[in-house]
Image: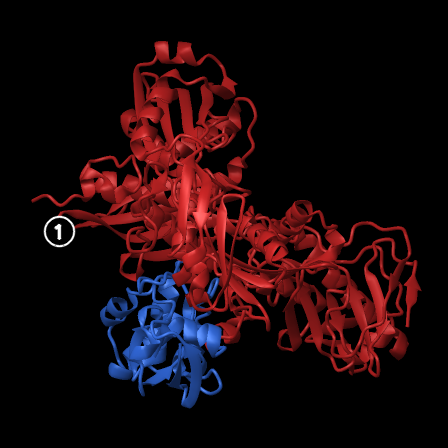
Amino acid sequence: MAIYKLQVNGKTLQADVEADTPLLWVLRDHLGLVGTKYGCGIAQCGACTVHVNGSATRSCVYPVSAIGNSQVITIEGLSEKGDHPLQKAWDEIDVAQCGYCQAGQIMTAAALLKQNPKPSMDEIEVTMNGNICRCGAYHRIREAVKLASTKI
Amino acid sequence: MKSTTTNSRRDFLKMSAITGGGLVLGFNWFSAEASAPVVFSSIVAGDINFNSYLSIASNGAITIMSPNPELGQNIITSFPMVVAEELEADWKMVKILQANLDNKFDRQLTGGSGAVPHSWKLLRNAGATAKFMLIEAAAQKWAVPASECTAANSFVIHSRSGKKLGFGELAEAASKIPVPATVKLKDRKDFKLIGKSSVRNVENLKIVTGKPLFGLDFYRDGMVFAMIQRPEQFGMKLKSFDGSIAKSMPGIIDVVSFKNNVAVVGKSTWQVLKARKMLKIEYEKEFALESTEDHDKLFLNLMDNGQATVRRKDGDVDAAFKNAAKAIKAEYQCPFISHSPMEPMNFFAHVRPDGVELVGPTQTPGRARAEISKLLNIPEDKITVQITRLGGGFGRRLYNDFALEAAELSSIIKAPVKLIWTKEDDMTAGTYRPAVRYRFEAALDASGNLTGYKLRGVGINSGNPTREHNFPSGSVENLLIDSVEHKSPITTGAWRAPITNFLAFAEQAFIDEVAQAAGKDPVQFRLDLLAKAKKSPVGDIRYDINRMEGVIKMVAEKSGWGKKKDVSQGFSVYFSHASYVAQVADVVMRAGLPVVKKIYAVSDCGQVVSLNGASHQVMGGIVDGLGHAMYSKLSFRDGAADQNNYNTYRLIRMKEVPEIETHFVDNGIDPTGLGEPALPPTGGAVANAIFKATGKRVRNQPFIEEDVFKTIS
């Protein structure tokens, strides 16, 4: 066990955990940030996606010891008031069914739009293909990413 | 303050004072006919968990409780929409809360595509009754006839005088109006919310900002975390275990055993997960350890030699086949599949000396309470269940094994515990869609008329794998449907559209084969059968011929059936639960492989409540049906599943979904349900289009393992 100081959503937070603890479980069990979801634990579904220094990262396989001073952004820190263009588009298109995967979908899309603010449908699909939505809301996820890209 | 009311035969009204505030109207949506007086307790201001499900506060705020578990079917939005519609409430002022398990609610469960059909009239009556009383109260205040007053946007209006009062201002007076025995419901042409797309999921903001909503998001001070190691092979039972290493690891509180389980209890999820890997467990064989090869042999053997249970028999099938000009026979098979919702199973339980607190995602909270009551010998009235949002269900959370585990564990360790399943636990611990094989046979006369039909279903823990009274039963003079079941240690359960999720594919693909053999257009062939069923019905018919015809004709029109040159089309139609869905798939060939380009769906689910929610159910159902038909399977070796996570168990992804166009039949009948009915037809439409494109029939799932998907090198 060791104390890790982490830069999360613009704040310095600390957790007393083992070095191999995945960031996912540090966020959920120790920092009370439960918006980042556990889906598969093996980086296959994308429900746990957060940003580490701006890159979409699967937090379920990312050990806390590897984070150092990297800036971590979770769904709770994507915007102050839930008004990121993607969050607004998700509401406008009414994307969610069960909603469990959506935080990960939004974080994946947010990293894409940061690097490529006007992605083509193909580029959206290639990026979003790594995130599973078991309810099958893929059409509306795609549409919402496209809509958000027009507002950035 | 306590007040008593005896005036309501239907127990609609509840009236209470808010401490230090105005009055609220409360309406019990679901109470049965009651003659006994009902006593109501006072309500504490700010505490909205009182025993009424619709309340109007003096400031105009409207609160509606949503009783049913929400797993993506949109019920938390759809139910309140129906109440608000009849109430003429301003939707922006409506606050919706997920109710806990409460005996005051009726059918507080999610399953069988039954919530809206069941509650439709109750919800409308609740809203209309409140509106009636608000209008009466206003009319009395203004000394005008109630018939001259109307309600809109949370106001009662007397247009002749221009008078207007808000629902909040009227709430107190309205609560004293006698409850009407009957109320007039709105004409559907006047609906402002129902059937429209303007109303969005009421939990959108919470979902997109990562607020705690789901069972796994539930944390409580002093709570411990637990995982259970279960036997990895079906047929094995626990013999002995050594938990000493696991127990010595950091953060681990205890290692305990019950039934075939070894549970590791600790201070965090990760520590428990790591320690569980260090358990040393010995199992011993209790039942046969079955493999997929065993099942394949079993299917063939039971198909010919099994003791079949007759499910339906019309006419003389043997004679029909003896006299047939042509006979067609084909077999279809599907593997076990897992529900694998995104949120793995989990549950919180705190068994205290004075009662039990349960929190978590379940489709059947009432059953969870009943089963835990029995398990722990604690009366049901000492058990509370808080219903969280469910990260998907698909039938898996109809079963409460995980809730029972959590409760039993809490009773052993005497601590509040959150039991967490990993995805691997979820995928390997059973309750699967059963593996089934069907044999269909059809007899045609010289003119290509269907004169005989036989279906035998052989299933592994499938119960009756047929739906013997569904189409084409009723349209064929000579018919025999029977089934054989093999009992296996591999556990099965209801999977979205139970049985029909595969039966519909097999049947609709086979009917396509029969139409081809008869030299008839597949759509016309079905319409001819329905016309025959209408003119001279054979035996019991439990589907509505007109509704089925309706969706068939409409999808043919919308999809340009028979008119397209650049795509190969396949057709399918199915009646399940109480709704009708017809689909056409457009397939094209790319690099020698068939690709589904587009699926058209026409659904008759009666009145659509939330247009967004309904279209999500259809599109999601199609993606679900297509994905599992194409890609998913669980195979077994010595009782253990070969696939245990999304790396080996393939789910459909964004790039694999075709365009989908959805239409609804607007026939004004009461809602008949939509959580499941769009899924069953998809596999058949796709398989039939693949045949059109390649000349090859796919008869087994997953399709991806069929020859037609193997690249020609």
Q: Which amino acid does label 1 sit on?
A: Ala
Provide the secondary structure element on which disc 1 rests: loop
Q: Which of B554 and B687 is in front in this view?
A: B687
Residue B30 visible somewhere in the drawing: no
* Residue at x 45% of width, y 58% of height: B344
Screen quadrant of the N terminus of chain A: bottom left
Residue B341: % across, % down = 44, 56
Apparent side of residue B485 relative to residue B368 in the rendered image (left or right) = left
Residue B428: % across, % down = 40, 47
The hue of chain B in the figure is red
Screen quadrant of the C terminus of chain A: bottom left
The chain ID associated with circle 1 is B
Q: Nearer the viewer, residue B209 or B680?
A: B209
Residue B305 versus residue A70 in the image, above or below: above
Residue B21 versus residue B30 in the image, above or below: below
Apparent side of residue B204 relative to residue B48 in the rendered image (left or right) = left
Apparent side of residue B217 relative to residue B688 in the rendered image (left or right) = right
Residue linked to disc 1: B591
Q: Nearer the viewer, residue B22 or A47?
A: A47
